[in-house]
C-alpha cells in the first residue's frame, strides 16, 4: 500500500471526522441554489481539462503499481485513464450539471376539502457513502450525481486507483470552491486502509444515510451483509430473456444477440434464455446461430441439445450463474407460466425481458414478475440510468426500499410535505 | 400472561413459520385482483359487525386482566372497545376498501429518442411487520392498509390486548377466506412472549421487508435500535410553531390553541412556540391567554416571563421535551433565522409550522427546515394520514428513506419499471 495506514484509533477519528464534516456540508447544501451546484460541476469539468497531465501522471503511478503486482490485462484496462477517457469524465460532469434541478421539485400537489393545499417536494437525502473499486471515473460520476441531488458524499475508491481518484477528487474540490460551496460536500477517504470500509459500513456515528457499493460481488456482498445503514445495490444481474410462442423471429434474433453479446460483463447482459416449446422448432436454431456466430457458448437442457447438437449440457448450477461472459444457458418451457416460475425461482430481481407479439402475454409477464426492470421486445442491455434518460447512474438497485432500478439523481433524493393554509384548525 | 409462552426453540420455529407463510402469501397477493382485496376488506367489516359480541367478550377478558394488574384509567381507555369503537373499526375497513387500487398505478411514463416507452408502476413492498401496543383497533387498521397495498402482514399486538386483537384478527381472516385470498396474508403472532418481538426485529430469515412500530417511545426506540430491517417510524414529535413578525394575530391565536390543546397526546401536537421579537409585545399575550384558558401550562424564557408573569422558567430540557401534555415551552427569537436555527437544533423532524403573512418568510421556512411536514397558517394537528387524504395511516415516519410523513397505502408500495420496445438493440 502506498499510503501510510494510520493506527486504528487514528483511523476511527479520521473517518468520524469525514462523517461530521459531511453532515455539516449536507446541511449547507440542502438549501443551496441550483446555480451554485451547476457552476461547481462546470468548474470541476474545466479543472479536469486543465489538469489532465496531473491526473494521467497519478494514474501512471497506479498503473505501475498494478503491473508490478501482476494484475490482469482486464484489470489494468479498468484502471487506465487516457485523454479520451478524461473527455468522457468531462462530458459526464457537464451532463449532470445540465440536468434539471431535483431539489424543490413538486412531485405531487392536491387540495383538501378544508382548503389546505398540500405539496410533496424533493429534498436531498443527506450524506451518501460510495464504495468502489478500480475504475477512477466513478470518483467524478458519483461525486457529481450526489452533489446535483444536494447530498454530501464520502467516496472510498479502491486502493489500486488511489492516486488517480485523489487527482480527480482534487478537481471536484476545485469546482466546489470556485462556486462557493463547502469543500466537504465531496470528500475522499485519505487512506487505503481497508478498515476504512468497515467504519463506513457502521455509518460513522449515524452521519451516513445510505451506502452505494460499486464493484464486484465480493464488495457488494460484504456491504450488504455488514452495513448498518441502508444500501442501494444489486448483488448480481441474473437476467432472463423469455421467447414467447407469439415472438417475432427477427426481433428475437437481434434482441437476444444484443442482450447477450453487446457487452458480456455488464449487469444487464442476458444470462438465461427461456424458449416456448411451440416455437422451439422454428425459433431456437436461428437465435442460437446468431449467438454462436458472435462467439457465445451454449449450455442447454435436453430438448435444446436435441435441436442444437453442439450445445453443452446445462446443470442446475447454470440456472443460478451470472456468467458475465460469452456463455448462455437455454431452456425450453412448456408455456409462459413455466417461464415465470423459472424466473421467480432463479432471478436476481434485476432485469428480465419477454419477446412477444401477444400483448396479453406481455401483460402477464409484466404483472407477475417482481424484478426492478421488465422489458418487452427490447435488449436487456438498456437497463442503465443513461439509457433511461436519467443523465447517469450511480448504480442499479434490486432492493425494494426507496430506490429500485437505475439510481440517478432523483433516486438520491427524499421528500417533504408543504401544507399551505389560511388559518385552518382541526375539528 | 394469559397465553402459554412456548420454549425458545419452539418460539423461533413458530415465528419463522409466520415469516415463510407471509412470504408465500405475499407472492400470491402481488398480482391478485383489486376486486378480491376490496371484497376481503368489505367481508372483514361485515364479520366484525356480525361478531360484535365475541369481540367485546374477548375485550372484557383483556380489560379484567388490565384492571387486576392496576393499569391506569388512560391505559384502560386505550384498551377498551365498545359498539361505537367497533363502528369506527368497521368504517375504517370500508374506507380502506374503497381507496383507489395502488398496485399497477403508473406513477411516471416517458419516451426515449430510440422509441422505448418507459413506465414506472407501483408494486407491493412484500411483507410488513407491525408491532403495536394496547389499542386493539390497530389490528384492523394495519391489516387493512397492508392488504390494500398488496402486502402480507405479521401483526404483533401488545400482550394486554391479546384477546381483543385475536378476535379482530379472526374477522380479518374470515374476510380473506370469503374473497379467496390466502389466510396468511394477515397473520397475528399467536403468543404474548416478548421474545417474539426480538425475532421479528431480526427479520425472520429475511422474510420481513419493513417493520412499523406503533406505540410509545420505549417501543419505537427499541425497534429503531435493534431492527436489522428497515423501520418506518418516528421516535417523537417535538413539534414547533413559529410566529413570524408578519403573523396575523387572529390566525396565530386560533391555530396555536388548536395545535397545542385540541389533543395534547398525539404526535402532531405543538410542544414549543417561537415568537418573533418584533411582535412579542402585541401577539404573545393573546396567544398565551388563549392557551391558558384551555388549561395549558406555560414555560418561558426570560423575555417571555417579563411579559407573562405567571409563566414558569423554561430550562434547556424544556426545548428537548415532547410533553404530550398541556404544557408548552415559549421562546422569543430575534428573527426567522434564529427560529430556524432553534428548530434545526431541537427538532425531531416530524412537523413544524409558521404563522406568517409574508410569503418570503414562508418560503424560507419551507426551504430551510428539514422536517417531514411543514405547515403554513394551519394547525400542526393536521399531521395525519387521514387529514392528508390518504384514507388512513399506519403511522408517521421521520426517516428519509422510502416513506416520510404519514404512511398510507401508497407509502407501503415499491415500484418497477416496464420498458416497451419494438425490437430495439443497444448500439
Image: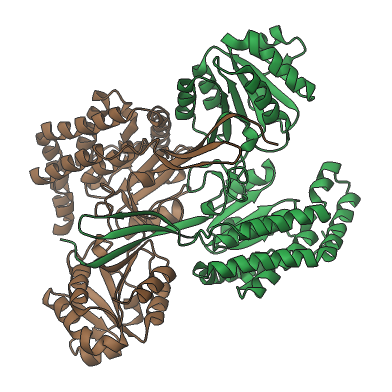
Chain colours: A brown, B green
Q: Quadrant where the N terminus of chain B lies?
A: bottom right
In the image, taking residue A342 as reference, residue A263 lies left or right, namely left
Considering only vertical position in the picture, is A270 above or below B216?
below
Q: Is residue B229 visible?
A: no
User: In this orientation, which residue lies closer to the viewer: A255 or B218?
Assistant: A255
Residue sitting at x 83%, y 58%: B59
Counting every numbered tag in the picture gives 0
Considering only vertical position in the picture, is A104 above or below B43?
above
Q: Quadrant of residue A340?
A: bottom left
Q: Is residue B62 visible?
A: yes
Residue sitting at x 21%, y 80%: A298
Where does residue B262 sit, x and y in percent of width and height? 73, 33
Where does residue B424 sit, x and y in percent of width and height? 20, 65
In the image, taking residue B217 as reference, residue A188 lies left or right, namely left
Q: Quadrant where the C terminus of chain B lies?
A: bottom left
In the image, taking residue B78 as reference, residue B389 lies left or right, namely left
Considering only vertical position in the picture, is B215 above or below A326?
above
User: In this orientation, which residue lies closer to the viewer: B43 or B393?
Assistant: B43
Amino acid at each position: 500500500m502506498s499510503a501510510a495506514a494510520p493506527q486504528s484509533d487514528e483511523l476511527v477519528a479520521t473517518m468520524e471526522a469525514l462523517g461530521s464534516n459531511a453532515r455539516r456540508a449536507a446541511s449547507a447544501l440542502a438549501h443551496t441554489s441550483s446555480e451554485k451546484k451547476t457552476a461547481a460541476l462546470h468548474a470541476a469539468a474545466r479543472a479536469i481539462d486543465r489538469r489532465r497531465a496531473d491526473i494521467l501522471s497519478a494514474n501512471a503511478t497506479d498503473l505501475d503499481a498494478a503491473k508490478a503486482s501482476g494484475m490482469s490485462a482486464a484489470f489494468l484496462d479498468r484502471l487506465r485513464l487516457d485523454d479520451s477517457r478524461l473527455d468522457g469524465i468531462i462530458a459526464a460532469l457537464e451532463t449532470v450539471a445540465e440536468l434539471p434541478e431535483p431539489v424543490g421539485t413538486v412531485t405531487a400537489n392536491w387540495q383538501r376539502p378544508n382548503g389546505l393545499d398540500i405539496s410533496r417536494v424533493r429534498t436531498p437525502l443527506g450524506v451518501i457513502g460510495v464504495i468502489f473499486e478500480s475504475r477512477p471515473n466513478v470518483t467524478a460520476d458519483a461525486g457529481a450525481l450526489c452533489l446535483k441531488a444536494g447530498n454530501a458524499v464520502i467516496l472510498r475508491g479502491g486502493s489500486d486507483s488511489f492516486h488517480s481518484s485523489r487527482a480527480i477528487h482534487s478537481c471536484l474540490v476545485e469546482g466546489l470552491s470556485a462556486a462557493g460551496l463547502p469543500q466537504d460536500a465531496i470528500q475522499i477517504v485519505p487512506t487505503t486502509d481497508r478498515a476504512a470500509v468497515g467504519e463506513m459500513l457502521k455509518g460513522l456515528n449515524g452521519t451516513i444515510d445510505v451506502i452505494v457499493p460499486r464493484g464486484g460481488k465480493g464488495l457488494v456482498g460484504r456491504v450488504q451483509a455488514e452495513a448498518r445503514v441502508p444500501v442501494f445495490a444489486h448483488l448480481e444481474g441474473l437476467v432472463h430473456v423469455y421467447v414467447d410462442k407469439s415472438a417475432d423471429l427477427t426481433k428475437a434474433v437481434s434482441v437476444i444477440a444484443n442482450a447477450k453479446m453487446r457487452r458480456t460483463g455488464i449487469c444487464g447482459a442476458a444470462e438465461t434464455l427461456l424458449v416456448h416449446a411451440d416455437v422451439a422448432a422454428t425459433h431456437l436454431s436461428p437465435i442460437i446461430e446468431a449467438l454462436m456466430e458472435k462467439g457465445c457458448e451454449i449450455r442447454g437442457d435436453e430438448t435444446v441439445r436435441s435441436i442444437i447438437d453442439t450445445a453443452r449440457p446445462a446443470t442446475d448450477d447454470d440456472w443460478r450463474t451470472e456468467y458475465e461472459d460469452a456463455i448462455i444457458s437455454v431452456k425450453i418451457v412448456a408455456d409462459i407460466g413455466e417461464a415465470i416460475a423459472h424466473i421467480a425461482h432463479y432471478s436476481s430481481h434485476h432485469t428480465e425481458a419477454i419477446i412477444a407479439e401477444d400483448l396479453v402475454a406481455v401483460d402477464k409477464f409484466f404483472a407477475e414478475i417482481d424484478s426492478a426492470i421488465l422489458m418487452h421486445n427490447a435488449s436487456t442491455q438498456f437497463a442503465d440510468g443513461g439509457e433511461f434518460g436519467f443523465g447517469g447512474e450511480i448504480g442499479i438497485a434490486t432492493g425494494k426500499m426507496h430506490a429500485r432500478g437505475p439510481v440517478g439523481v432523483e433516486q438520491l433524493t427524499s421528500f417533504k410535505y408543504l401544507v399551505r393554509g389560511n388559518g385552518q384548525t382541526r375539528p
